Amino acid sequence: MGAEAAHSALAQKAVLADYVRTHHMSPEEYVISKFEEHDVVCIGEQHRIKHDVELIQRIIPELYENGIYTLGTEFGRREDQPRIDSLLNAPAWDEALARQVTFNQSVTWGFREYVDVYRAAWQLNHGLPEGARRFRILGLGDSLDWSVIQKPEDRNDPAIMKKVWHGEGEHLWAKVVLDEVITKGEKALTYSGIHHAFTQYRQPNWSIEKQRLIRFEDRRMGNFLYREIGKRAITIYLHAPWNSAEGWEAPMVQPADGIIESVMAELEPEYIPVGFDTKGTPFGRLPGETSMYMYGYEDFTLETFCDGYIYQMPISEFRGVTPIEGFINEDNIEYARLQMPNPAYRHASIEQFNNAIAADADIPRRFANVR
């Protein structure tokens, strides 16, 4: 880096650091503030990161205190809404039902922190006075049938995948939010993987082999919401690695080419964690040249990708969620074998399933090579 470029980089970091100091809000404060001008805030994560799920747990009572009574979640099925409603309004916590709701959504989602999102909502409701409005979690997820997948190549067969989806999709996720929240003049937080949470941004389907854009993906839950209610729906990203411009199998990369972590590393401790806007701020102009998210865009920047950003700690300090011991057991192993998306597990043992769940939660290993 030449002297002029180095000076420019230092100046940029100073501007970004000053912005955080001047506009600092905790993640919880930041999320709540977005409801002043927006009706749906879509929070997106990279999955299985402990502090991200714990943030959602903490924010539930904050939502309620500010008149937001609904959380929509990827980690529960629409089909299970009666079970979720029963769980959150039961006189006593039903751990078995909470695990069942989580298992039904994904047979490998046996993680304590995700189950405890339901528990946080139950605790809130359990402590409310009689007659007070209850907090609600809406299951947004599909009920897919993975049993039709018998070999890896089946995933590339449109006819077979049509049977997996059987008419479901993220347009129905959005419909739940519109029908249960927006048409009633209310507001909601949604919590999902980031790719479902994109509102204005359209994710590129890029061919690494052919080095060309196949299409822009505009069928995500957030995209459907944005088409219906415009900028009343926004996206907030929870700091985590991005997928590499070299492809899905390549090591993940630092978001915004590492500039965010570089700035945060030099900030005083009292300013972290933090939530901040990207649109119309110095952070919004940060690049993303190392990530596949930039493909198809002439001028991809952080504000192209998301409206807001939450930073809690550097990726090197991330820890995974807690696997639930015995999540797969004699009672559910047969169903797990049938509904595992990976057909290699059609005859797997209980131990193999639970080991796979634990491996998925090993975030230090999974993010060890982030560049």
Image: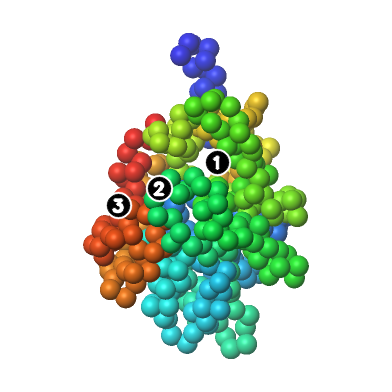
In the displayed structure, would residue 316 be above or below residue 42?
above
Element type where label 3 sits in the image: helix
Label 3, label 2: how far apart the Cα atoms are: 20 Å
> In the rendered structure, which amino acid carries the disc numbered 3?
Ala
Q: Which mark is residue 119?
A: none
| Picture coordinates of residue 85, whole percent (x, y) | 55, 78
Residue at (47, 65) in percent of width and height:
105
| Picture coordinates of residue 336, whole percent (x, y) | 36, 65
Residue at (34, 69) in percent of width and height:
334
| Picture coordinates of residue 148, whole percent (x, y) | 45, 59
Relative placement, left or right, of 145 versus 322 is: right
Element type where label 2 sits in the image: helix
Residue bearing the label numbered 1:
21
Determine if residue 64 is in view: no
Label 3, label 1: how far apart the Cα atoms are: 38 Å
Residue bearing the label numbered 2:
152
Q: Which mark is residue 359?
A: 3
